[in-house]
Image: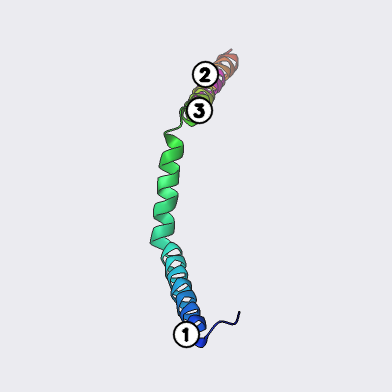
Amino acid sequence: MARDMDDIQRDIERTRRQLAGTLDELADRSKPKNIADDAKRSANAKLQDPNVQKVLIGIGVAVAGIIALSVARSNKKSRDIKEIQRLLAQRTDI
């Protein structure tokens, strides 16, 4: 059964409208602001996940521990250097 020209023309016009709508949607999605908004929404959704929150808390505790350890070691080194200087000063006084 052959289709008549009017049916073919309507199909072509419908396909053009669908294609135009798809292109408009792609253009809208590819705007930098929309990409940034999508990324922000996605990140916020991930941050609401309890497992992600636990991991981030663990990382925060680990970083705080490393910083505290580093400060403590630095203070110990400083005290050790002062003690060595004091001992050397006493030795030269003798």
Dominant secondary structure (helix, strand or loop) of the stretch shown in magenta: helix
Q: Earlier in the sequence, mark 1 or mark 2?
A: 1
Determine whether the residue tagged by mark 1 lies in a helix, strand or loop. Answer: helix
Q: Amino acid at mark 2?
A: Arg
Location of mark 1 (residue): 6
Of badges 3 and 2, nearer the viewer stands 3
> In the image as oriented, which residue stretches furthest toward the bottom?
5
The magenta stretch spans which residues?
71-80
Q: CB atoms at circles 3 and 2 under 8 Å apart?
A: no
Q: Residue at x 38, y 60 (%)?
A: 33
Give coordinates of residue 68: x percent, y percent: 49, 23
62 or 32: nearer the viewer: 32
Give coordinates of residue 30: x percent, y percent: 46, 64
Location of mark 3 (residue): 51
Q: Amino acid at mark 1?
A: Asp
**Residue 79 numbered tag:** 2
Taking 83 as reference, is 55 above or below it? Answer: below
